[in-house]
């Protein structure tokens, strides 16, 4: 089975069939802020739902829904365009035999 996924710097976006009910809606379209630069991965539209990242959910940051093609922007990366749909998103992880580390952008 082939899984479609999109990468945008340290952000991983994966299409999903549905979004769990009861998640809080964010009042903005920010997906992830870089720890070092402070720059933000942001959707140019849609609705973002927050999730609490834990080891149990593989550090899932949340979900979003976009009704039309939508850009994902960031000051240090090229803009990408996503097709309409529902997605879950994560901060990229990097392998380290000692710990589960986030990619720092």
Image: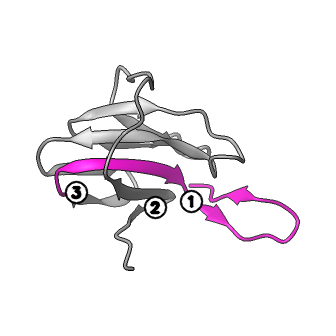
Q: Which residue is mark 1?
A: 92
Mark number displayed over residue 29: none
Quadrant hosting residue 102: bottom right
Q: Which residue is mark 2?
A: 9
User: Which structural element holds mark 1?
Assistant: loop
How busy is the neighbourhood of tag 2: few (under 14 within 10 Å), some, or many (20 plus)?
Answer: some
Q: Is residue 17 above or below residue 21?
A: below
At 39% from the left edge and 58% from the top edge, which residue is drawn? 14
At 72% from the left edge and 47% from the top edge, which residue is drawn? 55
Residue 95 painted magenta: yes
User: Which structural element holds mark 2?
Assistant: loop
CA separation in Å, label 3 and label 1: 18 Å
Mark earlier in primary sequence (3, 1): 3
Nearer the observer: mark 3 or 2; the answer is 3
Which segment is the magenta one? 82-105
Q: Locate the C terminus by quadrant.
A: bottom right
Q: Which residue is mark 3?
A: 82
For the residue pair 20 and 6, the one nearer the viewer reads as: 20
At 11% from the left edge and 46% from the top edge, which residue is drawn? 68
How many labels, in total? 3
| Residue 15 point in image, percent of width and height | 33, 57
CA separation in Å, label 1 and label 2: 8 Å
């Amino acid at each position: 089975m082939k899984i479609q996924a999109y990468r945008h710097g340290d952000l991983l976006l994966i299409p999903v069939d549905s979004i769990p009910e009861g998640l809080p809606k964010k009042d903005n379209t920010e997906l992830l802020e870089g720890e070092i630069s402070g720059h933000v991965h942001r959707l140019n539209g849609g609705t973002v739902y927050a999730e609490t990242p834990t080891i149990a959910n593989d550090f899932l940051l949340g979900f979003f829904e976009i009704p039309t093609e939508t850009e994902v922007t960031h000051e240090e990366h090229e803009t990408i365009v996503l097709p309409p749909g529902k997605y879950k998103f994560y901060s990229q992880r990097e392998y380290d035999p000692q710990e589960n580390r986030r990619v720092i952008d």
